[in-house]
Image: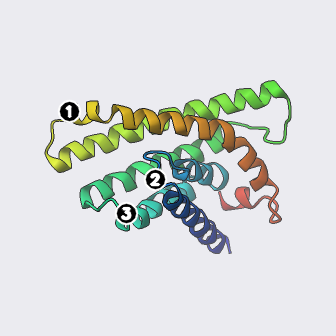
Amino acid sequence: MKSARQISVIAVMTAACVATNYLLIGLTNVKFMDLIVFISGLAFGASVGSSVGVLTWLVYGTLNPFGFLLPILFATSLSEMIYGLAGGILGRMWVFDYGGSGKSQILTEGLKFGAVGFLLTFVYDMLTNVATSFSLGLPLVSVLVAGIPFGLIHEVSNAAFFFLAVRPVMKLIRRLPEGDLNQEMR
């Protein structure tokens, strides 16, 4: 039963990632995908979060209206795993009181999640820029410099999404009728 629930959660979260990616296709590097993958790991464990990350890119990257390049698909799929892994690790390391309502607690947790989102996105952007440089045979410095505006948009938007959404979404997940579904799947 445990694996059926995990598969269901992975399918639903992957579908949410892919659907929101296409919904926001016109906004370059502004996506809810990284947030959803992170929350998948935070709520349901690193293996679930990592699976959501890889599967999302396998679907979205293959059916991408901007084109397809296998080495970049490979790099984005593996790099997206860091959000799910980090969520799973933090879900085990940090103790969060998602039900608490103190303003300072909400702000403190939001800032922690925002910082995590920014840092994970920076790492993701660096890894995918290196893969792009290697795949296209372009000088790494040129790719990194050209990627600065796109990276900043990605990193700042993710920091804002993580700051604003992780806590309330986790609060909702904890209220699921299955009780401690998230603990059961870890």
Q: Residue at horizontal 26%, vertical 40%?
A: 130
Mark 1 lies on residue: 142
Check disc 1 and give the amino acid type: Ser
Name the N-terminal-most of marks 1 and 2. 2
Residue 155: x percent and y percent? 48, 35
Name the front one of labels 1 and 2: 2
Asked if the residue under mark 1 is in contact with the one under mark 3, i.e. CB atoms within 8 Å, the reply is no
Check disc 3 and give the amino acid type: Asn
Per the model, the C-alpha gap separating discs 2 and 3 is 12 Å
Per the model, the C-alpha gap separating discs 3 and 1 is 24 Å
Name the N-terminal-most of marks 3 and 1. 3
90 and 8: which one is in front?
Answer: 8
118 and 25: which one is in front?
Answer: 25
- Quarter in which the C terminus is drawn: bottom right
Q: Is residue 150 left or right of residue 16?
A: left
Per the model, the C-alpha gap separating discs 1 and 2 is 25 Å
Q: Residue at horizontal 29%, vertical 41%?
A: 129
Q: Which mark is residue 26?
A: 2
Quarter of the rendering containing residue 134: top left
Extreme-top residue of the structure: 104
Q: Is residue 178 left or right of residue 182?
A: right
Q: Which mark is residue 58?
A: none
Quarter of the rendering containing residue 161: top right
Q: Element type at marker 2? A: loop
Name the front one of labels 2 and 3: 2
Residue 44: x percent and y percent? 64, 56
Neighbor class of circle 3 (other Cα within 10 Å; few <14, some 14-19, many 20+) is: some
Mark 3 lies on residue: 64
Residue 33: x percent and y percent? 53, 53
Check disc 2 and give the amino acid type: Gly
